[in-house]
Amino acid sequence: MQASQKRKRHLNLRQQDTLVAWLLLVPGLIIILAITFQPVLSTLYLSFFDVSSGIKAHQTFVSFVSVAAELVLGIAIAQLITARPFGWRFLRVSLIIPWAVPTIVNGAVWRWIYDANYGALNAALSQLGLIQKYIPWLIDPNRAMNLVILADVWHSVPFIALIIQAAMATLPVELDEAAAVDGATYWDRFWLIRIPLLRPAILVALVIRSVEAFRVFDIVYVITAGGPASGTTTISYQTYLETFSYGNLGRGAALSFLVSAFTLIMAYVYIRFLYRPQDAA
């Protein structure tokens, strides 16, 4: 009887501690939930209505060419570092510089490089004798988008390269050596051994960069401001324009939820592909 009473008393004490903990947490949770969900619910409400006061604008979506280019270059650079040629330590350290530069600063640098009057690109091409007069690089929509992609690739390739190189450093050397003894060529070992083993790291880098490319804003804002003729307008930049420039609050809310939905889909794909049972086995 005494043991049972002690157990009940102990449970009651635990329940009291839990109650006190919840009483202390609830006010903070209410504030956090109000701050977090109130704007989300308000945005969701606005997304069902045409709350507008401005003009319509053409809407274009971001190109994923940058993601493919970043993946290929990132794998190539990671493979080069893993091979450890002369100066590989300097290369690995220097990779951090473009990636560490804030995106808006990166955009400002590339806007100066592309400048039609005193840009470094025109100056370099002119010094090499490849052009006779300076070219206004950012007046053509297609060319402007390609140049924005180039700036984004320069900034983001180090991120992928560092992820892949870290994964390469953990690969078992025995498999590669055994394949070489069996007569496999370098490319056979690369495609049939390394790439399959690097698949989780590649998927992580690919999904993260795909989501970031879909949400790219600041580099477009600084370099081209979505122009010319909306040729470099991404969905995130269009959301900004609809909401703050054109006053189309409903459209801006709908676009923001579209970005969120795509991000959730990409996260789901990441989980499905990275944590499949056969990978965990």
Image: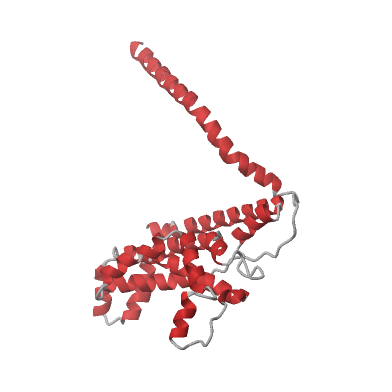
Q: Residue at x 53, y 59 (%)?
A: 218
Residue 114, image x, y percentages? 51, 73
Q: Residue furthest top?
A: 2
Q: Residue at x 52, y 88 (%)?
A: 132
The answer to which of 244 and 111 lies nearer the viewer is 111
The answer to which of 219 and 16 lies nearer the viewer is 219
Residue 210, image x, y percentages? 51, 63
Which image quarter is the N terminus in? top left
Which image quarter is the C terminus in? bottom left
Horizontal side of 275 relative to 29 (left or right) equals: left
Residue 163, image x, y percentages? 37, 62
The image quadrant that residue 30 belongs to is top right
Horizontal side of 55 relative to 102 (left or right) equals: right
The answer, for residue 101, to whether it is visible in the render is yes
Colouring mode (rainbow / by chain / secondary structure / one colour): secondary structure
Q: Residue at x 26, y 75 (%)?
A: 85
- Give the number of callouts: 0
The answer to which of 49 and 164 lies nearer the viewer is 49
The answer to which of 89 and 187 lies nearer the viewer is 89
Q: Residue at x 53, y 81 (%)?
A: 134
The answer, for residue 67, to whether it is visible in the render is no
